[in-house]
């Protein structure tokens, strides 16, 4: 397969991705292709390296001094770990939503506008803020209090604010690291519905501990697990219905049916 | 069998007396009260002694606040010449310490590796252990000649407030840096990750996210530093000059802004207190009473600074 077709079908892909923290081999030989404008869920037991892999997609692991990455992560046919790639530019194209809602201690408006401003946005900032909040299904709840602190919102609203903030930078891909694990079931459901809507024009990769969530929300699922020496690897990847109904691997089946994890 | 009739013995849930707890509680409360009482005692002494000064026939409050000279020999007690000298040394000290301290703090907290930080911070804190008398002679024998070399011997006097101010800045630098670094490091990593995740550079993250979030801690650092600069005594006593910079009138004082000239000698409030109280001063003298008036002024200035900064911080800080 040549790079042209790869770039057209896949939003991002890894080739023989290995991650080390110091001497510890955290993740080995991950070959994962993320389909464009689809939702891909990364699932697996604790410590299987799914968050580590997620953080390779926008070079967030660079912030951990002991982390070392081998292999390629191809974005538009370009390895983002090449020496001539600027991680700041990568993160402008590949946004991130975190486990715990982490709005800035600024107003709701400034939270959304911040990323666009530092990226040199030269348009109608008010319109961008409104559009981003609308896309994050938060506009109607906050349109009368854009000057209020982001921290005045509920947990679920804060998480949608963080999604709006990521959308305002107009990323191609949004990485979500257990985005609903700090939220109640109703707030979680709203985030899931939102993910569906966003996937029409954004690629979403989501790490989740909640298998029902993965089954409900994702188009593709990658199942990760660990070797006895605690190195994570990808056991199986496929379309979500296939992974959940007819997994090829016994380990996947055991995990999905709740026999371990 | 009814649910209440159990054959087991009911557990003893009655309130227990814990005399040790009570005693420790009382003891700790006593110590807390003691520190407040000590402070109150100091303030009371300051006020009552200062009151004796203002009750003297030679003194009036208006002249105290507005006269352009402090010459006890001829009953001129204009506190402003001392206050302005203190202001100059403190402002110079802050101009040196705040930008430098902030830069070092941002470097240590946002850029340096943990190993670099753990090596550099203790070294910096050693600076804080140097006796101030050493800094005083450093100002007189190193900083003053340096300034004379840079600016000219005809401009810079042997005793001058600039050298003293710069060296006070160096003295408080570790304090500013250490407290500012603590404030920056206390900002949760979640916020840094949020910024990096949006494509922010290290500098943007440090200046636009971490620094605003740490504002209240940073302001506390600056206030402690200003108070320390205002109260610093040994450096100004040695290097700034041994007599108030007096003027016949305020128009003389502001002629060519002579009162603000940093390259001439002047005596600060603390410098004056230490010089007068060092000699054979007698208890009943007006000089003795005047020291408490100066001390009270010092106290009120730092107290006002504290109040103002609390207001300012409350207004601008970002609560996370």
Image: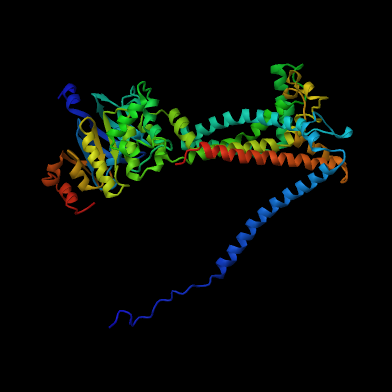
The answer to whether residue B28 is above or below residue A238 is below
Horizontal side of B220 relative to A172 (left or right) equals right
Q: Can I make out residue A167 in this image? A: no
Q: Quadrant of residue B200?
A: top left
The answer to whether residue A122 is above or below residue B285 is above
Horizontal side of A96 relative to A243 (left or right) equals right
- How far across and down, in percent of the image, does residue A103 sit? 38, 38
Query: Nearest the camera: A88 or A161?
Result: A161
- How far across and down, in percent of the image, does residue A63 sit? 39, 34
Query: Nearest the camera: A155 or A83?
Result: A155
Q: Residue at x 13, y 45 (%)?
A: A247
The answer to whether residue B224 is above or below residue A79 is below
Horizontal side of A38 relative to B288 (left or right) equals left
Q: Can I make out residue B3 in this image? A: yes
Q: Residue at x 24, y 24 (%)?
A: A76
Quadrant where the image shows the C terminus of chain B? top left
- How far across and down, in percent of the image, does residue A258 sit? 19, 53
Q: Quadrant of residue B198?
A: top left
Quadrant where the image shows the N terminus of chain B? bottom left
Q: Quadrant of residue A173?
A: top left
Q: Residue at x 46, y 35 (%)?
A: B210
State how the image is colored: rainbow
- How far across and down, in percent of the image, does residue B108 sit? 51, 34
């Amino acid at each position: 397969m040549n790079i042209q077709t790869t770039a057209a079908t896949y939003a991002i892909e890894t080739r023989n991705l290995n991650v080390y923290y110091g001497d510890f081999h955290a993740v080995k030989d991950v070959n994962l292709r993320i389909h464009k404008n689809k939702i891909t869920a990364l699932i697996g037991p604790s410590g299987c390296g799914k968050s580590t892999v997620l953080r390779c997609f926008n070079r967030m692991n660079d912030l951990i001094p002991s982390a070392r990455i081998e292999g390629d992560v191809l974005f538009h046919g370009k390895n983002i770990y090449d020496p001539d790639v600027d991680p700041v530019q990568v993160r402008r194209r590949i946004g991130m939503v975190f486990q715990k809602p982490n709005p800035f201690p600024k107003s709701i408006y400034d939270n959304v506008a911040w990323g666009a401003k530092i990226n040199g946005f030269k348009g109608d900032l008010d319109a961008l803020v409104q559009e981003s909040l609308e896309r994050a299904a938060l506009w109607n709840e906050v349109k009368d209090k854009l000057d209020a602190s982001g921290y005045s919102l509920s947990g679920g609203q804060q998480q949608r604010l963080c999604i709006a903030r990521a959308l305002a930078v107009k990323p191609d891909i949004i990485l979500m690291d257990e985005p609903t694990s700090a939220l109640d079931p109703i707030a979680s459901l709203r985030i899931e519905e939102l993910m569906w809507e966003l996937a029409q024009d954004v690629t979403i990769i989501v790490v989740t501990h909640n298998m029902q969530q993965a089954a409900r929300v994702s188009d593709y699922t990658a199942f990760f697990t660990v070797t006895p020496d605690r190195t994570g690897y990808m056991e199986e990847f496929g379309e979500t219905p296939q992974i959940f109904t007819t997994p090829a691997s016994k380990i996947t089946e055991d995990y999905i049916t709740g026999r371990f994890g | 069998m009814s649910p209440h009739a159990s054959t087991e013995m009911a557990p003893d849930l009655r309130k227990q007396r814990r005399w040790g707890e009570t005693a420790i509680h009382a003891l700790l409360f006593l110590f807390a009260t003691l520190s407040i009482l000590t402070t109150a005692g100091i303030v009371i002494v300051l006020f009552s002694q200062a009151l004796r000064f203002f009750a003297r026939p030679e003194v009036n409050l208006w002249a105290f606040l507005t006269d352009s000279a402090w010459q006890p020999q001829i009953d001129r007690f204009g506190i402003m010449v001392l206050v302005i000298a203190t202001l100059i040394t403190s402002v110079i000290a802050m101009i040196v310490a705040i930008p430098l301290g902030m830069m070092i703090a941002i470097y240590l907290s946002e850029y340096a590796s943990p190993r670099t930080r753990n090596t550099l911070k203790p070294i910096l804190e050693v600076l804080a252990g140097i006796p101030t008398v050493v800094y005083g002679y450093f100002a007189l024998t190193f900083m003053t000649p340096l300034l004379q070399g840079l600016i000219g011997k005809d401009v810079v006097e042997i005793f001058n407030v600039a050298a003293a101010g710069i060296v006070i800045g160096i003295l408080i630098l570790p304090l500013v840096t250490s407290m500012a670094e603590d404030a920056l490091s206390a900002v949760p990593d979640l916020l840094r990750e949020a910024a990096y995740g949006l494509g922010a550079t290290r500098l943007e993250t440090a200046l636009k996210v971490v620094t605003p979030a740490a504002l209240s801690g940073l302001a506390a650092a600056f206030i402690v530093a200003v108070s320390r600069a205002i109260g610093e005594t040994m450096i100004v006593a040695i290097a700034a000059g041994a007599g108030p910079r007096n003027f016949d009138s305020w128009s003389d004082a502001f002629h060519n802004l002579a009162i603000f000239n940093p390259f001439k000698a002047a005596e600060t409030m603390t410098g004056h207190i230490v010089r007068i109280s060092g000699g054979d001063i007698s208890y009943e003298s007006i000089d003795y009473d005047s020291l408490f008036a100066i001390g009270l002024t010092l106290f009120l200035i730092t107290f006002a600074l504290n109040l103002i900064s609390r207001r300012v911080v409350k207004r601008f800080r970002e609560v996370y």
